[in-house]
Image (cartoon, helix red, strand yellow):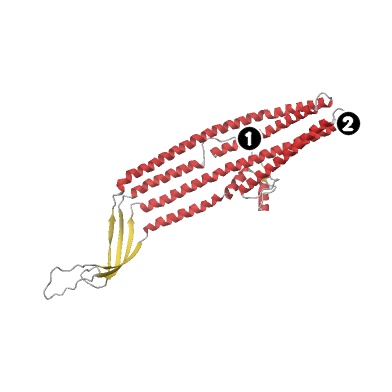
């Protein structure tokens, strides 16, 4: 029924979650969608598509055109003269326009490696984005449980004010009966004024927290919104750590492995076909001094062994990066496991503290009631009674503090392990 009410309220409001019951899970979801970095998801996917498209176009025919005009100080000519034969020398000014077409048949794996690099680079960017977005959950937790704590204190302060009002009326009747005097009533009045000050401060702090949470989730939140208290009885699953940082480490390792494959393509042979068409003076026949069209076609095999000189060092650089990344992952797991141990201890401590809170409150209540009887019989001063009333209120506030701290420690553990 709560979930149905929440969904209906959101659908009807459209712009506000006013007077609805907010859950921490809903705040996590809305904060993630509202965070400006979420827009990078689409940009990363588009970049990957563009890179894949560009890499795939390496199989398309490559066209290039060139033109030149030259003047030579000398041209080829026969060193002897033949009687009766007039051989006209080539012109010293020469011209030519060519169009070259190259088609790759096999590139040694360069294009396929570039495609794989585009995918792994995109995956690393996505995993890094997930890490950045995941950190929002911790900010939501701090604000959400801060509001819960303030709600509990506001409620308890109101009960405390009601208790003061009851005792104020009681002492007023004692004054009429001569059991108490005006100074006793003034002592209670001072506590009433203090409680009003505390209530004002608590309400102001709550509004500040509400405003910050509203800015984080991107929706206005009414001051009267009900913050649902999470269930603490659900058993925690604290086995394997599932943080997004681990998936980022894996993506980075895969990207480095892809870089290794790209090194190999640097010294692999390349095979392709080519064709060149041209027009100029002279043409292919260098003995004819006139403009002519021509073409050349063939198969080209190239094999550059220069990459073998640096191949070993290039691999060692990448392997050093992989070792550094493995050490970074190990450090992250070590620190995270320490954090898990600390938070488990914090949960146990808060559970143990809560075991005694109700008993302490009951005993404080008994002491307060006994003090009220003694004041009525003139055996105790109102100042002593106020001390017992404040002690009971403090015990109730301690319970509220322990309850919220238990919830926060549980969700801190959930954040640390992501399960």
Residue 201 in picture, x, y percent from top left: 70, 40
Which residue is labeled 1 in the image? 405
Within 10 angstroms of label 2, few (less than 14), some, or many (20 or more) residues? Answer: few
Number of on-image labels: 2
Alpha carbons under labels 1 and 2: distance apart: 46 Å
234 vs 195, left or right, is: left
- Residue at (59% x, 45% y) in the render: 28
Q: For the view shown, which residue lies furthest in the left direction? A: 83
The picture quadrant where one finds residue 360 is top right
Q: Say the numbered circle drawn on residue 315.
A: none
- Residue at (41% x, 50% y) in the render: 117
Residue 233 in picture, x, y percent from top left: 63, 35
Which residue is labeled 2 in the image? 176
Residue 202 in picture, x, y percent from top left: 70, 40
Q: Single out the mark in the foreground, 1 or 2.
A: 2
Residue 121 in picture, x, y percent from top left: 44, 49
Looking at the picture, tell me which residue is in the foreground, 127 or 289: 289
Answer whether labels 1 and 2 touch (C-beta < 8 Å): no
Q: Is residue 293 visible?
A: no
């Amino acid at each position: 029924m709560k979930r149905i009410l929440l969904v209906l309220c959101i659908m009807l409001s459209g712009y506000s979650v006013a007077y609805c019951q907010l859950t921490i899970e809903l705040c996590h979801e809305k904060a993630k969608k509202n965070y400006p970095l979420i827009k990078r998801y689409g940009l990363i996917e588009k970049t990957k598509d563009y890179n894949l498209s560009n890499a795939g176009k390496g199989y398309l025919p490559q066209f290039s055109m060139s033109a030149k005009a030259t003047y030579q100080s000398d041209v080829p000519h026969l060193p002897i003269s033949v009687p009766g034969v007039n051989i006209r020398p080539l012109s010293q000014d020469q011209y030519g326009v060519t169009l070259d077409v190259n088609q790759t048949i096999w590139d040694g794996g360069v294009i396929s490696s570039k495609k794989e690099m585009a995918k792994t680079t995109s995956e690393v960017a996505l995993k890094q984005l997930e890490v950045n977005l995941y950190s929002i959950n911790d900010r939501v937790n701090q604000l959400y449980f801060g509001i819960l704590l303030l709600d509990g204190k506001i409620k308890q302060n109101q009960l405390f004010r009601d208790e003061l009002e009851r005792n104020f009326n009681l002492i007023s009747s004692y004054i009429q009966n001569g059991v108490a005097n005006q100074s006793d009533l003034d002592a209670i009045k001072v506590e009433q004024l203090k409680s009003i000050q505390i209530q004002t401060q608590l309400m102001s702090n709550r509004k500040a927290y509400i405003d910050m949470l509203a800015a984080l989730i991107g929706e206005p939140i009414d001051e009267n919104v009900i913050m649902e208290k999470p269930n603490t009885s659900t058993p925690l699953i604290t086995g394997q750590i599932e943080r997004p940082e681990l998936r980022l480490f894996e993506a980075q390792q895969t990207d480095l492995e892809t870089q290794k494959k790209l090194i190999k393509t640097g010294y692999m042979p390349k095979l392709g076909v080519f064709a060149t068409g041209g027009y100029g003076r002279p043409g292919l026949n260098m003995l004819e001094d006139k403009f002519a069209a021509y073409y050349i076609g063939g198969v080209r095999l190239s094999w550059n062994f220069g990459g073998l000189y640096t191949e070993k060092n290039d691999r060692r650089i990448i392997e050093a990066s992989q070792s550094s990344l493995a050490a970074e992952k190990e450090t992250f797991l070590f620190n995270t496991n320490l954090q898990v141990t600390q938070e488990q201890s914090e949960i146990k401590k808060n559970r143990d503290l809560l075991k005694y809170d109700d008993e302490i409150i009951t005993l404080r209540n008994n002491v307060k009631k006994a003090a009220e009887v003694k004041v009525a019989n003139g055996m105790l001063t109102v100042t002593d009674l106020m001390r017992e009333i404040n002690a009971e209120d403090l015990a109730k506030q301690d319970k509220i503090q322990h309850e919220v701290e238990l919830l926060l420690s549980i969700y801190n553990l959930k954040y640390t392990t992501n399960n």
